[in-house]
């Protein structure tokens, strides 16, 4: 009897799961005889395995692997999100969560980087530099960042007790903090580069990004902004509607912003601009990189197709598949592709792929990265006429596998400076160096952010320690023997290190500003050492010409 009841229960559960997977009425999706037959096969296999395999199986794990397998057979960007990770995913898309409002860095003892201004922690007196030692009378020492975050997050209006150690005062303090809605910011850096040039970096697109962006725009306009550098480098995308809204602020009424196509009627949509955009008349330069993807490519593509902005940097990732979330019966999520998007002139910039070959998709993408990103002439020669398009004012742009910027900045891959910028070595060392000098730094610079940015100088001994750190960690080697130099093996000339003192000093200062005052604080300093940024701000004549609806020059390439 037990086996019989289980036999009848499992198909019912599988039926429920499959209906939830589809996210629609079950019978409307399985009307075809072949679909019904294949579903019966799936049920049969599940029941046979569950009842007859030599060892007892974990039904939940088996179903999860089955869902993953189905999604993996579709395309590289459809994915399964377990129930324990689903809320974090929703929070990232929503742009907020219930918490206590701190930015912290995990470690043996997690360090508060900064309380969020006006948030619950700042209101009760938590300060930058505090160490989290207990949460609700349980030790927090040695916990991972995810573990600490899980304990601090919770329903808005509930309380959590936090015990911290304050090094500057050498004492422990306990706070009862009422959780509130905490924003997950998409923009960590915005500032005036000069008396007329604004800079805004968007790190991702959440539901709140457009509102956040507009606040930054109004602030910069109040400081005299007449033109904007929009930094979309390393932006993986997110909520498409937010990218569309920001594009609408820069393009005129009636202009196509993006088109989507899919099987469902709701996916067959053309998004158009409206009157009154806040940046319709401002010259624009957009920075893009190999990691700019999805929603960031929608925004960049719309601006390029309408000759509205000059794109500078490196060829983008190439993701033009639109995902929608479907919640399953246990709270897990399927993030499944339901459509494709096309830029205003009709470009599909999705990197080609074969269904079910996700590993090959990424291997091919990175194997071909150098030619695909930097060798512009070779790339242009390889593009068939069917993937060549004309912008609104006659410039040639390309579909298939990302967006080629108007001005490509190719790195010197043999240079030590390129390695330092790309390896995050300066950021790792800055955190380590700061941990050894925290009390000294905080006692002088706490709450003096602007003075730090304008007056702090990285000491000479820190520069020496940086190179020692790099070699002790086996990150790179410095040699005096020219025959030993090998950039692929990370062996560089010692003489080159000597010429980079100014670069390293600036980058360490920018990284330290981020550690002390929060992510993005040091971006103005880091940008001054960035060849792509420096090249971009030298191109305002071309951008202004583009903004005046003149045909710009063809793609140019600059080596860092």
Image: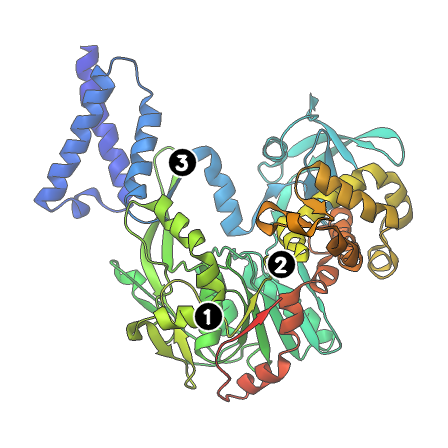
The answer for how far apart the CA atoms under marks 2 and 3 are is: 30 Å
**Few, some or many residues within 10 Å of mark 1 (<14, 14–19, 20+):** some
Q: Of callouts 3 and 1, which one flags the residue occurring earlier in the amino acid sequence?
A: 3
Q: Determine if residue 215 is in view.
A: no
Residue 407: x and y, percent? 54, 73
Q: Which quadrant does the C terminus fall into? A: bottom right
Residue 199: x and y, percent? 66, 68
Residue at image mark 2: 187
Residue 59: x and y, percent? 31, 23
Residue 353: x and y, percent? 32, 54
Q: Determine if residue 321 is in view.
A: yes
Q: In front of the other: label 1 or label 2? A: 1
Residue at image mark 3: 331
Q: Of callouts 1 and 2, which one flags the residue occurring earlier in the amino acid sequence?
A: 2
- Give whichever of 178, 96 is nearer the camera: 96
* Numbered disc 2: secondary structure: loop
Residue at 48 percent across and 68 percent down: it is 299
Residue at image mark 1: 376
Residue at 70 percent across and 23 percent down: it is 139
The answer for how far apart the CA atoms under marks 1 and 2 are is: 31 Å
- Give whichever of 39, 451 is nearer the camera: 451
Q: In front of the other: label 2 or label 3? A: 2
* Numbered disc 3: secondary structure: loop
Q: Of callouts 2 and 3, which one flags the residue occurring earlier in the amino acid sequence?
A: 2
The answer for how far apart the CA atoms under marks 3 and 1 are is: 46 Å
């Amino acid at each position: 009897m037990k086996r019989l009841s289980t036999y009848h229960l499992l198909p019912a559960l599988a039926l429920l799961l499959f209906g939830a997977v589809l996210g629609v009425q079950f019978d409307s999706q399985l009307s075809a005889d072949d679909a019904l037959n294949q579903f019966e096969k799936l049920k049969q296999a599940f029941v046979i395995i569950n009842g007859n395999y030599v060892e007892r199986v974990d039904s939940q794990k088996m179903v999860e692997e089955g869902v993953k397998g189905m999604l993996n057979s579709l395309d590289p960007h459809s994915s399964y999100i377990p129930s324990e990770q689903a809320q974090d995913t929703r929070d990232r898309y929503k742009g907020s969560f219930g918490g206590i409002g701190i930015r912290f860095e995990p470690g043996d003892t997690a360090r508060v980087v900064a309380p969020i201004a006006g948030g619950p922690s700042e209101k009760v007196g938590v300060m930058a530099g505090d160490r989290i030692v207990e949460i609700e009378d349980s030790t927090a020492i040695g916990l991972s960042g995810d573990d600490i975050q899980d304990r601090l997050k919770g329903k808005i209006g509930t309380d959590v007790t936090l015990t911290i150690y304050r090094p500057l005062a050498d004492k422990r303090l306990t706070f009862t903090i009422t959780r509130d809605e905490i924003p997950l910011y998409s923009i960590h850096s915005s500032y005036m580069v000069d008396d007329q040039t604004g800079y805004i970096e968007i790190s991702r697109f959440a539901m709140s990004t457009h509102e956040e962006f507009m606040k930054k725009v109004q602030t910069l306009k109040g400081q005299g902004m007449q033109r904007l550098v929009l930094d979309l480098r390393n932006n993986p995308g997110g909520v498409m509607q937010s990218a569309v809204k920001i594009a609408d602020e820069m393009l005129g009424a009636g202009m196509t912003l993006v088109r989507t196509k899919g099987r469902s009627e709701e996916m067959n949509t053309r998004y158009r601009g409206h009157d009154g955009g806040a940046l319709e008349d401002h010259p624009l330069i957009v920075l893009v990189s190999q990691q700019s993807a999805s929603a960031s490519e929608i925004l960049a593509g719309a601006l390029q197709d309408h000759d509205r902005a000059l794109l500078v940097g490196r060829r983008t990732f190439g993701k033009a598949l639109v995902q929608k979330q479907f919640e399953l019966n246990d709270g897990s999520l399927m993030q499944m592709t339901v459509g494709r998007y096309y830029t205003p002139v009709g470009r599909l910039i999705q990197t080609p792929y074969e269904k079910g070959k996700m590993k090959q998709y990424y291997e091919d993408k990175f194997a071909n990265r150098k030619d695909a990103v930097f060798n512009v002439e070779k790339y242009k020669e390889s593009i068939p006429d069917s993937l060549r398009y004309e912008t609104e004012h006659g410039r040639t742009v390309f579909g298939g596998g990302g967006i080629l910027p108007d001005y490509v900045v190719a790195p010197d891959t043999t240079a030590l400076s390129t390695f330092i910028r790309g390896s995050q070595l300066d950021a790792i060392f800055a955190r380590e160096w700061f941990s050894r000098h925290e009390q000294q730094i905080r006692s002088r610079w706490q709450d003096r952010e602007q003075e730090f940015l304008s007056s702090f100088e990285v000491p000479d001994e820190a520069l020496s320690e940086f190179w020692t750190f790099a070699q002790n960690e086996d990150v790179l080697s410095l040699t005096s023997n020219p025959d030993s130099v090998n950039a692929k093996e990370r062996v560089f000339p010692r003489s080159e290190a000597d010429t980079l003192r100014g670069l390293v000093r600036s980058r360490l200062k920018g990284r330290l500003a981020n550690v002390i005052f929060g992510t993005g604080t040091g971006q103005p300093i880091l940008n001054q050492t960035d060849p792509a940024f420096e090249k971009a701000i030298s191109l305002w004549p071309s951008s202004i010409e583009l903004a005046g609806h003149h045909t710009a020059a063809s793609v140019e390439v600059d080596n860092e």
